[in-house]
Image: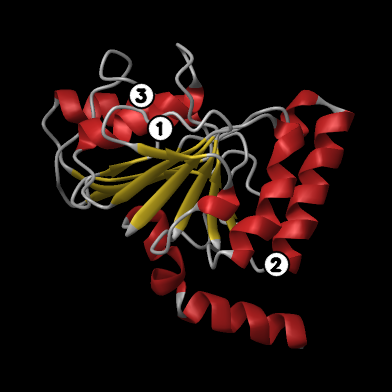
Amino acid sequence: MIETATMTTRFSSTEKILESFFAPKGIAVIGAGTKPGNQGKRIVDSLIAQGFAGQLIAVHPDGKPLGPCLSVRSVQELPQGIDLAIAAVSAERVEALVKPLADKGIHHLIVVSGGFSESGPEGESLQKNLKDTANKFEMLVIGPNCLGTFSSADKFNSFFLSADDIRLPGTGSVAVISQSGAFLSAILDQLASREVGVHRAINFGNRIDIGECEA
């Protein structure tokens, strides 16, 4: 009965729960560094190209800025106003981010990192530990092993795909939910080529938390 009541409350305010995944005020991209091909940097580049106007901070031990994107060396150094974190670090490092993020008041996390249940028994263990820790600290998670979310009207795009990889649609009324990142990127590219606008899109990958029901 307690679990049922909790889920009813959760789904009754789903729009509010999910909003920071699509229209965040501030974003921390964890793992975004200056090394060529760095996945986090590709996400930063996508957000800048999309025209995201909110606060954008890279988190990387070297602390080097990425163009107009400021950088800090750790989650503990993040400024106020961040409501979404995107983790682009190795699978082994993701779970340790949850508590520091929660301590900073950040409770929305997109994990683009692979190497979890899709990779075998060791990855399954990492995924279970991540899920348990996220639940403990009330962290909402999209992923792991995902592209994340896209919201054309909010100029938000967490994909690590460049303009050479995918054409993204303009604003419209269509919404797309997909477990597969490859399927989602193909659909969005095709919709863009047909000039069909998209409101929002989500790819949830391994789905340890937020999935098709909430979306």
The secondary structure type at the circle numbered 2 is loop
Q: Which residue is labeled 2 in the image?
A: 137
Amino acid type of disc 1?
Leu
* Residue at the image point whose x is 69% and y is 41% from the top: 94
The secondary structure type at the circle numbered 1 is helix
Disc ID at residue 186:
3
Q: Which residue is labeled 1 in the image?
A: 184
The residues bearing labels 2 and 3 have C-alpha atoms spaced at a distance of: 35 Å
Amino acid type of disc 2?
Phe
* Residue at the image point whose x is 32% and y is 28% from the top: 45
List x then y, in percent, for residue 73.
Answer: 55, 39
Is 74 or 157 nearer to us in this picture?
74
List x then y, in percent, for residue 213.
Answer: 53, 60
The residues bearing labels 1 and 2 have C-alpha atoms spaced at a distance of: 30 Å
* Residue at the image point whose x is 40% and y is 50% from the top: 27
Q: Is residue 87 left or right of residue 84?
A: right
**In terms of image quadrants, where is residue 56?**
top left
Q: Are marks 1 and 3 in contact (CB under 8 Å)?
A: yes
Q: Earlier in the sequence, mark 1 or mark 2?
A: 2
Is 25 or 163 nearer to us in this picture?
25
Q: Is residue 197 left or right of residue 145?
A: left
Name the quarter where the N terminus is drawn.
Answer: bottom right
Of marks 1 and 2, the one in the foreground: 2
Q: Residues within 10 Å of mark 3 (few under 14, many from 20)?
A: some
In this view, 15 is above or below 110: below
* Residue at the image point whose x is 46% and y is 24% from the top: 182
Disc ID at residue 11:
none
**In terms of image quadrants, where is residue 186?**
top left
